[in-house]
Structure formats: structure tokens, C-alpha cells
Amino acid sequence: MTTLVGRPSVALLVVDMQNGVLAAAYDRDRVVTAVATLVDKARDAGVEVVWVQHNDEELVSGTESWQYVPELVRRDSEPLVQKAYGDSFEDTELEAVLAARGIGWLFVAGAQTDVCIRSTLHGAIARGYDATLVGDAHTTEDLSRFGAPSPDKVIAHTNLYWRHHTAPGRTAGTVDTADIDFAANSRA
């Protein structure tokens, strides 16, 4: 359980599902479909959906590459957090957004597995949140030309690592989209 007092609620955190991030992403269409399914499940269960959007020299605010992919549509009532670092908490308003909504448990999906997803999961755990990775709803680009493992191996390793990750007093783990029942996981 989260170590954050008075934070019984659950949220889906959708990280960097932007055109420029997903342009060369591994298994893009399947992952976008999984994230869209998660968003629908969260909305149907009355669970907050919080969107995170990266900004940098390649993802310039307002450009086509910076926009979320067209298959995913954020509602005006759903928070949008802008970030410039891998960890969605670093130098952003994410903590304030989650605190205002009583959120202590995050289900994390999006891109990129080996940067923003991992950083955000660790950032959440370090700050006292429960953090569950949605194992079939994150992706990355192929960086094997630089010596990295192939994307399928990066994703599999991240799922394995997070499935067995522990933190004192907190829930961590990996679950697939089909196995998520947001209503049953809600603590509110």
C-alpha cells in the first residue's frame, strides 16, 4: 500500500504517446490499441486518466510530432502534465495533480520503455506511490544499432524487472491490459 496518507485513489498515467515518440516505436499499433483500451476501462470505472506530454528540441510544443497520436483523445477534464525529463515527476506539476485527486496508486503505460517509463516508475516508488506497469501497453524504439538489446527484449526485461520489484510498504508489479479491473483495484 502507498505510504502517502489520505491517497486511496487509483489513476492511469499515460506517458508520451506522441507522434514523434511513436514514429519508430516497436509494435506501435498494438500498443496504441492497448493504451486506448486502458483509457476506456479507466473512464468506465471512474478512474482518473492523467496524461503526460514530453517537450524538448525534437518534440517542440505545438508541432505535429509533439501532439498525442490521433487514436488517443484526451478529455478536457483529464489533467495534462508537461515534462522535459524522463521522470514524469521531475520539475512538473504531476505530484500536485495527483495529490489534489487523492491518488496514491499509478498504473503506468506509454513510451519509451527504457527512458520515460522506467524513470517514471522509479520516481513514483521513490515518492511513496504504488506503481504498476501495464506490461503490454508500453513500447520503445529500436536502439540496437547503438548496442542496446532489441525492443522486444527491452520490453520483456522491463516487465520482468518490474514484476519482481519491491519497495517497503508499497505495491509494485506488472499486469496486462486484459487483467486490469480498475473498479476492483480502487481503494476509494
Image: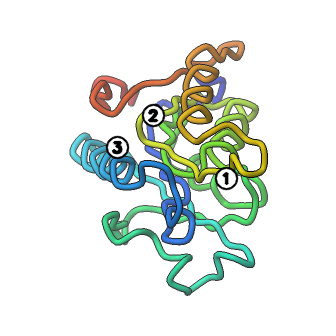
Q: Amino acid at mark 2?
A: Val
In depth, the one of 116 and 147 nearer the eye is: 147
Q: Earlier in the sequence, mark 3 or mark 2?
A: 3
In the image, residue 46 sits, relative to residue 173, either above or below, namely below
Which residue is label 2 attached to?
134
Q: Earlier in the sequence, mark 1 or mark 2?
A: 1
Q: Amino acid at mark 3?
A: Val
Q: CA distance from mark 1 to mark 2?
A: 16 Å
Q: Label 2 crowding class (10 Å Cα cut-off): few <14, some 14-19, many 20+?
A: many
Q: Label 3 crowding class (10 Å Cα cut-off): few <14, some 14-19, many 20+?
A: many
Give the position of the N terminus as an image quadrant. Answer: top right
Judge left or right: residue 29 versus residue 140. Answer: left
Which residue is label 3 attached to?
47
- The residue under the point 27% across, 29% down is 178
Disc 1 secondary structure class: loop
Q: Position of residue 113 (x, y in %)?
A: 60, 43
In depth, the one of 49 and 133 nearer the eye is: 133
